[in-house]
Image (spheres, rainbow, N blue to C red):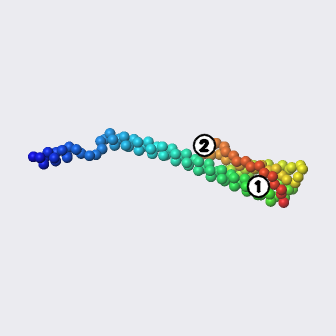
Amino acid sequence: MKILKKINRKLSKRDGFSLLEVMVGLLIFTLGLLLLMSMMVVSLESNSWSEKTTISAQLIREKIEQLKNTPASNLASGNDVVDGFTRTWQVTNSSTTNLYDVQVAVQWQDAESRIFACTTYTMIQPN
């Protein structure tokens, strides 16, 4: 008889999770995943912005190098479009020296049609 009572006690003391505990756990897990997804979206947008900024800086450097290697008689302001980036440059002659003031700007739009720009000012002495 004592053995049956021990077996009954063991059967009535079942370890495990109730349905409520499982539902609360799933709710917490789901909220965590939603927060991670929003952070992922921000991360992807930041990566895109960084890539565009790096490309615009390279386009600015490229144009300055082209202007440095251009004869003074051919230096002129202008603009062009390179892979969706609008590049504009202004060249003005300094009156006292043979140096030229150069401003190069690159603009682009993101997926939400926001306009971004990078601008550099420098002085060059052409060949």
Q: Label 1 belongs to which residue?
A: 64
Q: Quick one: 13 or 72, which is closer to the camera? A: 13
Residue type pointed to by label 1 = Ile
Residue in the image at 69% along x and 52% along y = 57
Residue in the image at 82% along x and 58% along y = 70
Residue in the image at 83% along x and 52% along y = 100
Contact check, label 2 and label 1, Cβ < 8 Å: no
- Count residues near mark 2 (Cα–Cα under 10 Å), then give few for <14, some for 14-19, many for 20+: few
Q: In the image, is 120 to the left or to the right of 71?
A: left
Residue farthest to the left, as pictured:
1
**Residue 82: mark:** none
Note whether 69 is above or below 20 in the view shown. Answer: below
Q: In the image, is 67 to the left or to the right of 107?
A: right
- Count residues near mark 1 (Cα–Cα under 10 Å), then give few for <14, some for 14-19, many for 20+: many
Residue 25, position as x, y percentages in the image: 37, 43
Q: Quick one: 24 or 61, which is closer to the camera? A: 24
Residue 79, position as x, y percentages in the image: 76, 50
SS assignment at label 2:
loop
Residue type pointed to by label 2 = Glu
Sequence-first tag of 2 and 1:
1
**Residue 112: mark:** 2
Q: CA distance from mark 2 to mark 1?
A: 30 Å
